[in-house]
Amino acid sequence: MSSRMFTLTINQTDSRRDGDRVPQLLKDLRHIPARLDFDRSVEDEVQGILDCPHQAVEAAMIALRSGSWYVGIGVGPVNEPLPNQIKDASGHGLIYARRAVDRLRNHKDRVRVAVEGPLADIAAEAEAVLRLLGHIVHDRSHAEWRVLDLLTPGVRGQQKAVAEELGITTQAVSKAVARSQWNEEHAARPAAARLLSLILEVR
């Protein structure tokens, strides 16, 4: 028996230069609800299996932030019952994710995210939107992230509290939010998730 899910295979781009970044990535991803939690599958690779396309988008953005990862998203069936460890999981969804990561190895773009699934045209559209979002996330400065990491999407009236916590003006917070395209990113995330979900509708 199998169920259609979203599988992420995330490979470090240069572990010889950067050292092992898997522990930090797993820490950054641990708040995301998963059918099978993100874990190290082999040396410098992390995999996880998700039910929800919005969670897949969230995980991809977290990995793309640092620029240190190839992010492959596979949309398709995963064999059930799921094992206890991700390295023992199987199914076409995992094959699609592996194919996506392999395709990225020859990709020269700074934002390395690919999507594979049974509907290639919709997968390509999802990939294009995720790549645009990834550029926004990847290009932010450290100063902007100091502000953004204290914000919650969709909650009004946060900027004053963030300004007080960081010891800066509310105007500085507002400028960081505008410059970083934070609102635009979060407004566009559902479009990427919707396209990922459409890949599951193949008959």
Image: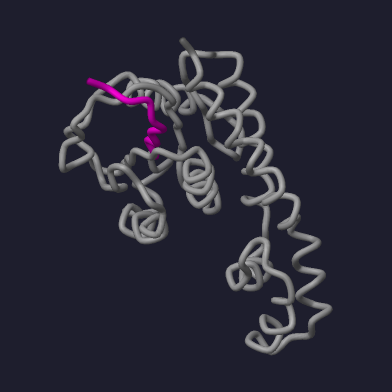
Residue 183, image quadrant: bottom right
Relative side of 38 to 87, left or right: right
The image shows residue 55 at horizontal and vertical percentages of: 48, 45
Residue at the image position 46 percent from the left and 37 percent from the top = 71
Task: Say if 76 sits above or below 82 in the image.
Answer: above
Relative side of 85 to 150, left or right: left
Task: Say which quadrant the N terminus sits in.
Answer: top left
Q: How is the image coloured?
A: one colour
Residue at the image position 38 percent from the left and 30 percent from the top = 5
Relative side of 94 to 123, left or right: left
Residue 14, image quadrant: top left
The image shows residue 166 at horizontal and vertical percentages of: 65, 85
Task: Say if 165 sits above or below 15 in the image.
Answer: below
Q: Nearer the viewer, residue 139 or 46?
A: 46
Residue 109, image quadrant: top right
Magenta region's main secondary structure?
strand
How many callouts does the rendering have? 0
Residue at the image position 34 percent from the left and 22 percent from the top = 77
The image shows residue 124 at horizontal and vertical percentages of: 60, 21
The image shows residue 152 at horizontal and vertical percentages of: 61, 66
Task: Say if 32 sits above or below 44 in the image.
Answer: below
Residue at the image position 32 percent from the left and 19 percent from the top = 92
Residue 65 is a magenta residue: no
Furthest residue in direction top, as rendered: 203
Q: Nearer the viewer, residue 138 or 127?
A: 127
Relative side of 83 to 146, left or right: left
Q: Nearer the viewer, residue 3 or 72?
A: 3
Q: Which residues are magenta?
A: 1-10
